[in-house]
Image (cartoon, rainbow, N blue to C red):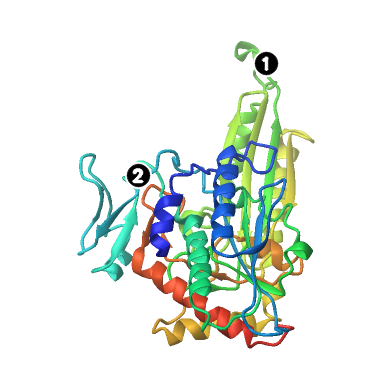
Amino acid sequence: MRAYERLIRYTAYPTGSDPKCETTPSCHAQWDFARDLETEMRDLGFTDIDLDEHCYLMGEIPANISDYKGPIMGLIAHIDVSCEAPFNDVKPHIVHYEGGDLIQNEEKDLRVSVADFPFLENYIGCDIITSDGTTLLGADNKAGIAEILTLAERLQKDDSIKHGTIRVCFTPDEEIGMSSEFFDVKKFGADAAYTVDGDAFGECQSETFNAIEVNVVITGLNIHPGSAKNKMINASRIAAEFERMIPDAETPEHTEMYEGFYHLCSMSGDVEKAQMEYIIRDHDLAVARKRGETLQKIADFLNYKYGEGTVVVELEESYRNMHEILKDHPKLVDIPLDVIREMGTEPDTSPIRGGTDGAFLSFKGLPCPNIGPGGHNFHSRKEFAVVQSMDKAVEMLVKITERFAQADKDI
């Protein structure tokens, strides 16, 4: 079975994670998907399969090298999909792309516009999997799962591919930042790993953002508007004033590559109380923390203006730039880079403008770069995956497993 066939089958599971849920996993569909993956892993010859109480599914592909003593490689992907676009009743279909707009739904005139996404034309002559435009596809990260299990099938059928011990883990709730919460690195048992959770084939990434979560609480004073002069403190208006003091050029819609940002994710309130949720992102930890200080200075100014305690800013550091760890593991990054070049593609090492499981796990003692499974426009109704890119990703994984088995134990 080819990877794209698995992906199409996997899209039937509505595994959108729920940020409001306090349990892991955050939706029952993740259990359904994980249990079926568990069965598939058994059929593919995995050993030491374990689905734990938090829906982490682990298994092992035993080495086929006699008396193997080399490094143990890990492969990781996540079973949930984003809830930022509709994820129920996904209707995948394949379009042989000949250029122009990618038509998702002719009846509703839903399409992926080449004007908006000019990289589409890189795939002229290829077969593209997309939804009908009313939902996301779920290639993030079901394409990665499909490729890992297609690799397992290749290794099961072709003993001439010499490889060491490979540990696999499919995690829950990555999209809401909870996938590493209960990840047992010691139990996983790998010396190093790769997340198959990028975008296009050819990506090999060792840098992520540093992440700070921000909660702003504003307390006002509600007085009857007819007698409010010099008395009312309108929390919602102060919230708007707070947002206006954020540098306009330092927001997601105006930044790229190594440029960090402030992002207002949500805002609610009335006269008496308002709340704002921001995220701060930057590849430089010192700069990210400086942005946090800027928000506190805005709060200090508004507290001077409206009264002490009117604005409270709460900052919580989330994940860190995994480059801090991976810079000490150059061979781990060089293996996929060399493989991608040998396959005729120049690797894309652009920094990730986000985080991955690897960003958390690298700091837990499991160095973990990210590689691309062959998809685009994740978290969107415009999401698609490329059949030929997925095939290449599987071939890349085959070659990586061979190279990894020849590496030093302290990779």
State the SS at label 2. loop
User: Does residue 128 appear anywhere in the picture?
Assistant: yes
Quadrant for the C terminus, please: bottom right
Image spot of residue 134 (x, y percent): 35, 41
Q: Residues within 10 Å of mark 2 (few under 14, many from 20)?
A: some
Image spot of residue 177 (x, y percent): 64, 51
State the SS at label 1. loop
Q: Going by the image, does 370 lie left or right of 393?
A: right
Quadrant for the N terminus, please: bottom left
Q: Looking at this view, is 150 or 66 the one in front?
A: 66
Provide the residue designation for mark 2: 91
Provide the residue designation for mark 1: 223
Q: Going by the image, does 125 lie left or right of 265?
A: left
Q: Going by the image, does 252 lie left or right of 5?
A: right
Q: Nearer the viewer, mark 1 or mark 2?
A: 2
Q: Is residue 305 above or below residue 197?
A: above
Q: Is residue 55 above or below residue 141?
A: above
Tag 1 near tag 2, CB within 8 Å: no
Residue displayed at 77% across by 62% down:
187
Q: Going by the image, does 22 lie left or right of 124?
A: right
User: Does residue 349 appear anywhere in the picture?
Assistant: no
**Three-letter code, disc 1:** Ile
Residue displayed at 46% across by 54% down:
253
Label drawn at residue 321: none
User: Does label 1 or label 2 sit earlier along the sequence?
Assistant: 2
Residue displayed at 60% across by 14% down:
225
**Three-letter code, disc 2:** Lys
Q: Is residue 243 above or below residue 294?
A: above
